[in-house]
Amino acid sequence: KAGVTQTPRYLIKTRGQQVTLSCSPISGHRSVSWYQQTPGQGLQFLFEYFSETQRNKGNFPGRFSGRQFSNSRSEMNVSTLELGDSALYLCASRKWDLAGGGYEQYFGPGTRLTVT
Amino acid sequence: DAKTTQPTSMDCAEGRAANLPCNHSTISGNEYVYWYRQIHSQGPQYIIHGLKNNETNEMASLIITEDRKSSTLILPHATLRDTAVYYCIVRVSPTQGGSEKLVFGKGTKLTVNP
């Protein structure tokens, strides 16, 4: 079974630009979450999507947004990039089994974003 | 969610058991203990979770004390590939349709030495 895939793996952008990152969940997983990891702040939750709807959101400015498609694939967008947005962006998927269980999250390898 | 306390770093000899402790003295009755690990430059990997009974899977064992205020993750025969940061997370398991948000602390940096 293929794992969570993220594209691109590495990205370099300049301040003020915008960026879109993509995540494909494990087949059968209906929920996708996004996390930001930096040396200073560690791993921080951005948002979670299920059924194309944002279900939960972390404490990030509105420049960070996301969406989910009908096939559960997800994208996140960061507009007006700042130097502090340089980070590893991780996507995680889980089943979201309404019958119970399926709470474990499975992470992708991440996208390393560098803002110059 | 209850807060967790883990040692900053630990060392273990290859082939020996690695025992990683976690304190969660304010844990509530409906909160689970989850363990994830992150090998350098990779995404975190789910290891195991439990509520009150000890749990074992192909990767590790989880021992939860009777009062549930602490737990220990056991890697029975540590290998060099087990060198990683290990995160202990206490979390209410979401109800049907509920959202899940993992709050990661600093974790324990485990170094397995040859």
Image: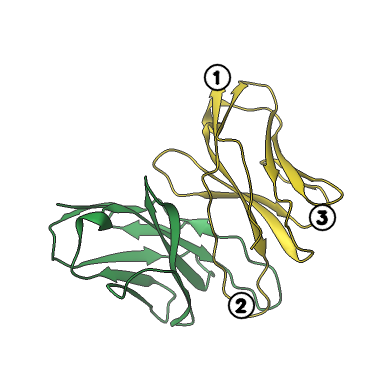
Chain colours: A green, B yellow
The residue under label 3 is B52
Mark 3, residues whose alpha carbon is within 10 Å: few (<14), some, or many (≥20)? some
User: Which of the labelled discs sits on residue B98, or is there none?
Assistant: 2
Give the amino acid at mark 3. Lys
Please identify, in this view, whether the residue under mark 1 or under mark 3 is nearer the observer.
Answer: 3
**Horizontal placement of A22 versus A50: left or right?**
left
The residue under label 1 is B113
Q: Residue under mark 3: which chain is it in?
A: B
* Figure label count: 3
Q: Residue under mark 1: which chain is it in?
A: B
Q: Are marks 3 and 2 on the same chain?
A: yes
- The residue lying at 53 percent from left, 53 percent from top is B104
Q: Position of residue A41 (x, y in %)?
A: 40, 51
Q: Are marks 1 and 2 on the same chain?
A: yes
- Outermost top residue: B114
- The residue lying at 71 percent from left, 59 percent from top is B32
Q: Residue under mark 2: which chain is it in?
A: B
**Whole-number angstrom distance, CA of label 3 to CA of label 2:** 22 Å
Compare marks 3 and 2 and give the one earlier in the sequence.
3
Compare marks 1 and 2 and give the one earlier in the sequence.
2
Q: Position of residue A56 (x, y in %)?
A: 49, 75
Q: Are marks 1 and 3 on the same chain?
A: yes
**Whole-number angstrom distance, CA of label 1 to CA of label 3:** 32 Å
